[in-house]
Amino acid sequence: MKVKKVITAESSRLSAQLFTIASLVATIVPPLLMIWVAASIFVYASIAHHPNPKVVHYNRIAGYRFYGIAGAMVAFGQPIYGIFDNWRGLVLVWLIMAVVIIPWGVWDLLKARKDEWKDMVIEVPVNE
């Protein structure tokens, strides 16, 4: 037996923005960044199977942005860190991440906010 469930437009919009919001917060508050790298995998995977394809699209773009710059900093962060003498190098690595994630993340949030979201009705199987 299946039951109909409504996914509201507001819920879909928030799901589309969740990964970006958390990435922005983790980038602005550097101690949260390492925790977010681990937690983001679960958030990304849970949103990746959302029934609304627009939510999945926004999640995918946010993931590309965050994981792309995080991966680049794994490859190039250590040399930058070494060249610019410890804490200055660390600040520069964080600054590079912030320059990529913050402006594009804010742009993505505004774009999702302006996008047209509609309620969805899905059928969910019920265990008997």
Image (tube, helix red, strand yellow):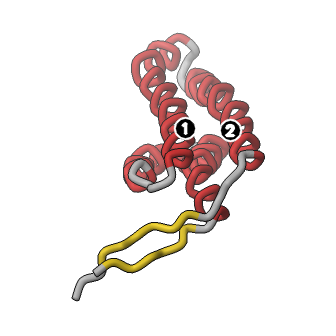
Hey, what amino acid is under mark 2? Asp
Is residue 4 toward the left or the right of residue 62 in the image? left
Looking at the image, residue 109 lies above or below residue 87: below
The picture places residue 85, in percent across and down from the top left corner, at 56, 17
Does the image show residue 114? yes
Label 1 crowd (10 A; few <14 / some 14-19 / many >=20): many
The picture places residue 89, in percent across and down from the top left corner, at 57, 21
Hey, what amino acid is under mark 1? Ala
The picture places residue 42, in percent across and down from the top left corner, at 38, 53
Distance between the alpha carbons at the discs numbered 1 and 2: 8 Å
Q: Say which quarter of the image contains residue 74.
A: top left
- According to the picture, the residue beneath numbered tag 2 turns out to be 108
The picture places residue 51, in percent across and down from the top left corner, at 45, 56
Is residue 58 toward the left or the right of residue 102 in the image? left
Is residue 30 toward the left or the right of residue 42 in the image? right
Tell me which residue sits at (73%, 35%) in the image: 107
Q: Are marks 1 and 2 in contact (CB under 8 Å)?
A: yes
| Mark 1 vs 2, N-terminal side | 1
In the image, 68 versus 58, the foreground residue is 58
Name the image quarter holding the C terminus: bottom left
- According to the picture, the residue beneath numbered tag 1 turns out to be 62
Label 2 secondary element: helix
Looking at the image, residue 47 lies above or below residue 101: below
Label 1 secondary element: helix
In the image, 12 versus 25, the foreground residue is 12
Does the image show residue 31? no
Q: Say which quarter of the image contains residue 125.
A: bottom left
Residue farthest to the bottom, as pictured: 128
Label 2 crowd (10 A; few <14 / some 14-19 / many >=20): some
In the image, 70 versus 44, the foreground residue is 44
